[in-house]
Image (cartoon, rainbow, N blue to C red):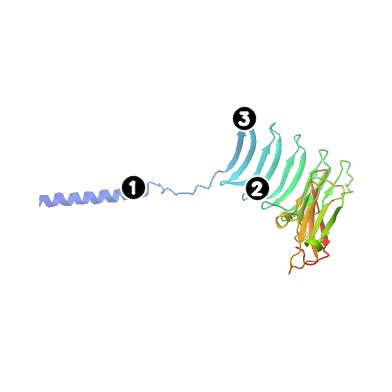
Amino acid sequence: MKQFTLLTAAIIMILASACGGGAGQEGSGRKKDVQVADTGYTGIKNYVRDNVKLREVTYKNGIREGMTRTFYKGGQLEQEIPYSGDSKNGEAKWFYPDGKVFRVTPYVNDTIHGDQVQYYKNGGVKARLRYTDGRRHPGLEEFLMSGEKVTGYPAIRYRVNDRYAERGLYKIFIEFDDMAENVKFYRGDYVNGLVDLDSLSPLLQTATTGYLDLQKKPGHHADSVVVIGSYLTQFGNRLYYRQAIRLPYKDLN
């Protein structure tokens, strides 16, 4: 009987201990650790080399969100670009070393869209270039420091070497009438009236002249060929020209 009593007491003590442990864990108020995914850094990071700050980037959860700035070696602000969702969105600005605005470029989802405007140090407009979904409009506006609009850009012209009768070859040379260098020529056309360099094929060329060799090709039919000329202005901007050239032979390619 005594042994039975001791055994029963031991069992009761074990059960009480087990129940008490459970109550203690629950009543402690400690929550299970929740595993949160590492979403990356939030804040501003400074990028420094040789004790000189070159760039500062604003991050949210590891991606660029807010303003990114770069600096001249002297510490002056060089450019600032707004980001949203890790993409350029808003007006990006470039500055002269004295802090005055040099250029403003509008971005939508990493793509230039709208009027890019360049400025003189006196605040006057130097040039205006228009973009639609990253594609340039062919023309531009440029201004002297006095505010006078620049005119008198060169014309594009072409000449031919017709050797169709003897070799089935029709060679076209294209250039600007001021024989400017730093020019570029392409075969192809605008896309919806806009410049899309990815859809154009560069011509072989010298410093001033592009040339296009068209060869007789039976079964091919073309009334004309289109060449795009790119002229570098005195302000360092590209002005685009379209030249459609009618072909005297319809089987050239």
Residue at mark 2 to residue at mark 1: CA–CA distance: 51 Å
Task: Check disc 3: other Cα within 10 Å, few if <14, some if 14-19, many if 20+.
Answer: few
Q: Residue 63: x percent and y percent?
A: 59, 47
In x, y percent, where is residue 237?
79, 46
Q: Judge by depth and name the residue closer to the eye, 2 or 132.
A: 132
The residue beneath circle 1 is 24
Residue 250, compared with residue 124, is above or below; it is below
> Which amino acid is tagged 1?
Gly
Q: Looking at the picture, how far across and down is residue 35, in whole percent?
A: 45, 49
Q: Which mark is residue 51?
A: 3
Q: Which residue is mark 2?
A: 83
User: Looking at the image, which is closer to me, 223 or 183?
Assistant: 223
Answer few, some or many: residues within 10 Å of disc 1's Cα (few below 14, many 20 plus, some between 14 and 19).
Answer: few
At a point 71% along the width and 38% down the height, the residue shown is 78
Q: Quadrant of residue 146?
A: top right
Residue extending farthest front: 166
Residue 120 or residue 24, whichever sits in front:
120
